[in-house]
Image (tube, coloured by chain):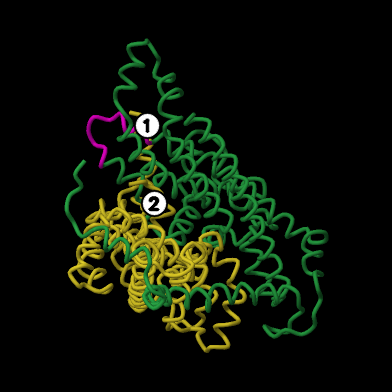
Chain colours: A yellow, B green
Amino acid sequence: MLLSVLAFVWLYPVVWTLANAIKSSADIYRAPWDLPWPPALGNLSEAWSRGQLGLALANSAYVTAMSVAVVLVLSVTAAYSLTRLRPPGRAVLFIVVLAPLIIPTEVLIVPLFSLFRALGLINSLPGLALVNVVAYVSFATVILTGYFRTIPQDLIDAARIDGAGRVDVLLRIVIPLARPGILAVAILVAVLTWNDFGASLVLIQKPEAFTVQLALSRFSTFYATDQGLTFAGLAIAILPPLLLFLVLQRSFIQGLTAAAVRR
Amino acid sequence: MVRPVRSRSGTRLSLLRPSRRERAIDLLFLLPILAVLVGFLFYPLVYGIVLSLHDTRGFELTTFVGLDHYAHAIFGDAVFHQSLLNTVLFTGVAVVLLTGLGLFLAVLVADMKRGRTFFQFVFFVPFVLAPVAVGAVWKFLYAPFFGIVPTVGSALGLDTVTFAPLADPNMALWAIMAAFLWRFAGFNMVVYLAAIKGLPREYYEYGVLEGASRFQLFRRITWPLLWPQTFTLVLLTTLGTLRIFDMVWIMTAGGPSHATETVATDIYVTAFRFLQVGYAQAMAMILLVVILLLTIVEYRVLNRRAEMVSS
């Protein structure tokens, strides 16, 4: 009973946002509790075109895909070397790779901006992806070392005796056996990159390169007087992650909590 | 005892003592991540230290000023004091409330016979949504006239139609806290819930036989056995909250009159609005030191407790 009340409180802001997205601004003021009927779909199409949300969604998808791909390559090879190979100075390297966990991007954003300006990476979507890679790659590596350690060493030794090289072992044994871990990392990095706001606010200035979060932040300041429009923009921005979560609930929860749940 | 015949010992030896060439090849797999971290994390960190010791014009270094920026931030900048206090206070309260709320929800959901997946979904949803969206939605929830908080208040007979928590310096930080709890409680709940499912049933059955109340069962069995999760969640919440920027920026941009200023919003405004780049970086370095200190202290305290529990 208490739980149902709490669940209602938790769900209400989301439902309210989606409902207000298809109400006219006048109705949002006049009748905050009424059902949005008939739906004012005009809000949605106007928000889509005025906010350039199509472009922003494409930009965000591009940055997210790049960030996930690069993080996966870097963290899989790093975790493989740290857990299953013997690079010289492994203990020190482990600390070097994991130290960034306690250095948030907020602390580095000023020198990063300076560096990116010198490299001509301001307003560059690959540049933005790179900042996200730096922010999450250590997290990804920690999570993957956890998964890689559960793979029996005998299996790897046997393959090596049969003449398999390091890359063969990685591609044919480690990656297939650690697939849940890799999926978890991919989802985690995708959600974190998609939701990033701070780095994009600093590094992206021209509207053609805006991500969804930047477009949305503009919405809530520029169109603050037209609530119907703003709610429509919000609804468009929260629907893709919401629907994905609805479909892939288990993988999402597993991925997003991978750093905190022990196996 | 007869050991299974395998060529195991031989390979183990060769793996134990790989040649220098072999180990160099092993190192190659780490080069990509090291290159990225050195170029875009450790180098900016070192450059950030240099930056914090200089005056700047735009983003170019001009004169070396030693620790002047640090001295000014620590002794002479009331806004920075406010932002540091807000950040640490907000983090402390968030750690306590999020841990408590997450555990409370997890215990309630664990007791359900049906619908666990549904409740897990409901409480986890806000965590998937972007902080910008969450901030904007809550800003509207608090909005006078059509926001739900004032509307519910006036329906209850309170004079809240024009009530605006985000514009009130005494309330704004805690109004953001409510949104923050809404967004993150589900995460803690899921982590606790996963652990609760793995707790040995016999402990509870024995406790019930001994006549323990539900609260006693929680106090004596659940809470101590969940200490590893509490440990992880407290550290993660601390690290995640000390850097808070996005939700604050969207909801109040640090206002009204710095009542919700955090170190991260202060850095952003100082560097990118006022172009006091060296000074902003000095504040960033102080934030990094605060993060290090608090993390180490928490780690020590929680770890000691963990050892006490296990002994």
Q: Which residue is mark 1?
A: B107
Q: Which residue is mark 2?
A: B126
Residue shown at 47% from the left, 43% from the top: B151
Q: Find the distance from the CA under tag 2 to the CA under tag 1.
A: 20 Å
Q: Position of residue A105 (x, y in %)?
A: 54, 67
Amino acid carrying label 1: it is Val
Neighbour tally class for label 2: few under 14, some 14-19, many 20 plus, Cα within 10 Å: many
Q: Nearer the viewer, mark 2 or mark 1?
A: 1
Q: Position of residue A31 (x, y in %)?
A: 39, 49
Q: Is residue A179 visible?
A: yes
SS label for mark 2: helix
SS label for mark 1: helix
Name the side, left or right, on which A17 lies relative to B89. left
Q: Is residue A53 visible?
A: no
Q: Please tell me whether the stretch drawn in magenta is mainly helix, strand or loop.
A: helix
Question: What is the magenta range?
Answer: B106-117
- Are the residues at dot 2 and dot 1 in contact (C-beta closer than 8 Å)? no
